[in-house]
Image (cartoon, grey):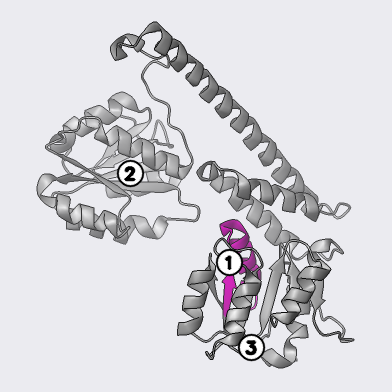
Amino acid sequence: MYDNLKNHQHYTVILYTPDKDIDQHAIDVLSRHFDHILVTSDKQQLLIAVSQSPAVVVFMSFEHFADALQFYYTHLEPMQRTPPTFKVAYLIARKDEADAYHAFAIDAIDDYVVVRPLYEVHRPILVATTLMRQLGVMAASKQAKKAHFQQLHLSAKVEQQMLEGLRHKKALKEAFTHSINELQAHIMDQSQHLGDDGEQVDVKEVKALLSRLCSNELRPMLLHLQQQALDLLEQCLHCSSQQSGDTVDTSKATNESVQPCVKDAKVNDILLVDHDEVSLQLSARCLAHYQCQVVEVLNGREALKLLQQHAFDLIVLDINLDDSDGINIAYQIQHNQGTNQQTPLILMVKQLCSVTKQRAKDAGFEVLLEKPLTMKSLDAALIQLQRRLALKE
């Protein structure tokens, strides 16, 4: 009735249960709707199936909810990657619903279904579909692709409107798929250029690609492409190019020559603030090369809160934040009698201009860097701040 590992290695849904009989109703509902479902009571089989499936929803059923939590955090949670490759939902008894809801509310679990007894028959399907979308996949249903309007008892006019809506959705999905394929091809092309001594990566094109990924509203569907773009851009950091991404501007002129690298920086704690998660990850990867602790924050409110609680060796701020901007945050740092009042500041901008330079200088920024950051631009910036940061020669 069900797939096994010998026949199929990639699954849409996995249900792990020590006792199939008590969950037979849920198993029947899921298996009628989804292809490639695995039901197993073998722990090793479960772990292998999860590791081999690119995106899968795992349902776990134990007699006691606490036992299921312990199993997850002991065996499955250590396998989780960024971006995540699986989501876990718990099949529970009615008596455990209060505990399961509490765990869900504090984000300790992805979701749960009350299956003993299973009052909401299609609830497992809805949970699985929602979690799949969070993983960036759309699972095909075994049911017919055409709409069964007769079951909905709609008028002819409404049926026509629904058909038009479905056609529009299909067109959007096809356009999105085309966009995905185009981006995938571009990433592969740029990656190949990195390995060719006769070619040099067009950093501007890669930056434009990253911008497209950041602005797309269907972000969950792009997680794997974002990761590939980040990996590609990280490789670009080490390219000795003269692209605009290496531009460094300081408020004080210097004749000091730029050294190849300053990884011996005595910088232990850095606060990094950027409103975009992808850009934040890329910048954090750059800073991690200096073997320091990078605290990542997405908005000005959280940044100011942390600055009141912790002393940092360096603060790196994006000029554009959802709730403020880096320059305004810098003004507040400079005028507060806190532990970070004298902490060196770096401002990240997409493009340098004279107005921004003056505003940044007035706010106390000693260094301006164009995004995305590169190792070359960071090395130059840290050398510029060498005296303030007490860097090793």
Q: Position of residue 253 (x, y in %)?
A: 86, 84
Question: Separation of disc 1 and disc 2 at Cα?
Answer: 40 Å
Query: Mark 2 falls on what kind of element?
Result: strand
Segment tinted magenta in the rendering: 270-290
Q: Residue at x 39, y 35 (%)?
A: 12
Magenta stretch: includes residue 271: yes
Residue at image mark 2? 58
Quarter of the image for residue 279 reads bottom right
Q: Position of residue 149 (x, y in %)?
A: 35, 11
Q: Position of residue 347 (x, y in %)?
A: 69, 73
User: Can you say which quadrant of the picture contains the N terminus?
Assistant: top left
User: Does the residue at mark 1 contact the one at mark 2 (Cβ under 8 Å)?
Assistant: no
Please tell me how crowded label 2 is: few (under 14), some (14-19), or many (20+) other residues with Cα within 10 Å.
many
In the image, which disc is placed on residue 324? 1
Please report whichever mark, 2 or 3, sits nearer to the chain's N-terminal start.
Answer: 2
User: Mark 1, mark 3: which one is toward the viewer?
Assistant: 1
Residue at image mark 3? 266
Q: Residue at x 25, y 35 (%)?
A: 123
Residue 87 drawn above or below residue 290: above
Amino acid carrying mark 3 in the image:
Lys
Residue 176 drawn above or below residue 286: above
User: Can you say which quadrant of the picture contains the C terminus?
Assistant: bottom right
Please report whichever mark, 1 or 3, sits nearer to the chain's N-terminal start.
Answer: 3
Can you name the residue that lies furthest to the left here?
Answer: 95
User: Mark 2, mark 3: which one is toward the viewer?
Assistant: 3
